[in-house]
Image: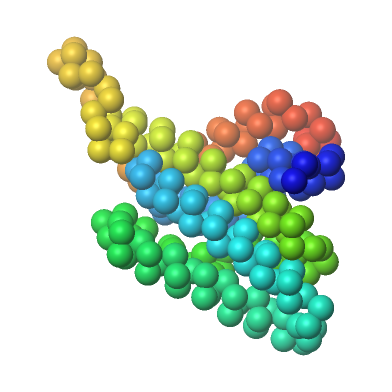
Amino acid sequence: MALNSKTKAVLLGPLSKNNPILVQVLGICSALAVTSKLEPSLVMAIAVVIVTSFSNVIISLLRKTIPNRIRIIVQLVVVASLVTIVSEVLKAYSYDVNKQLSVFVGLIVTNCILMGRLEAFALGNGPWPSFLDGIGNGLGYGWILVVTGFFRELLGSGELMGHQVIPQAFYDAGYENNGLMMLAPMAVLIVACIIWVHRSKNKDLQEETN
């Protein structure tokens, strides 16, 4: 199905101009907790994309039958069901990563990005736009996690996905890994740098903020 300008904006907008982390500053907690290594960052990003996109579709399909007074409960049930499925799949096929992610997979249920899209978009739009909106916001959230995890693991341990990246010659010459990169405050610093670069390239966002 071809994408018109409106659907392109729904899908691609969250990657930059409407990014949930860079612009709306949502979902920061998991960005601090799961990005010490690249692998759990990737898995968390994929999990959020799956849950966000499919929960958007389900809520969109049910939107005309959900009583307004219980809509939040219905949204939580749908999200919790999808998160449970994702969690069980991780336990079955990637148990070590599931242990690294700890409780944060379960906390996708309360992710303000996800609940915000259900409330602000899926309840008022059809399944296809809602699916694109879920994918876009999931990817917009996910690429921040991946970039943060990339730099934290590379600079903190000299590895990526468990493989040595920084040559041994660098260590022989006196290079040392930055252990601070393994601490959560460094994730704040990296995300802040990404936001700074993003805002410097998007002057209109600065004007809106001011």
Q: Which residue appears at 49% of the width and 50% of the height? A: 45
Q: Which residue appears at 52% of the width and 65% of the height? A: 108
**Which of 138/150 is in front?**
138
What is the tally of numbered marks visible in this picture?
0
Q: Quadrant of the C terminus?
A: top right
Horizontal side of residue 177 vs 65, given as left or right: left
Could you tell me residue 39's position as x and y percent?
Answer: 36, 45
Could one spot residue 185 in this view of the protein?
no
**Which of 62/101 is in front?**
62
Q: Which residue appears at 53% of the width and 75% of the height? A: 80
**Which of 22/62 is in front?**
62
Q: Is residue 145 above or below residue 129?
A: above
Could you tell me residue 119's position as x and y percent?
Answer: 74, 68
Could you tell me residue 209's position as x and y percent?
Answer: 79, 42
Q: How is the image coloured?
A: rainbow
Q: Which residue appears at 23% of the width and 25% of the height? A: 176
Question: Looking at the rendering, which quadrant does residue 166 occupy?
Answer: top left
Horizontal side of residue 198 vs 185, given as left or right: right
Could one spot residue 63 in this view of the protein?
yes
Q: Is residue 146 above or below residue 71?
A: above
Question: Looking at the rendering, which quadrant does residue 174 occupy?
Answer: top left
Residue farthest toward the left in the current orientation of the protein: 172
Could you tell me residue 61's position as x and y percent?
Answer: 73, 72
Q: Is residue 180 above or below residue 129?
A: above
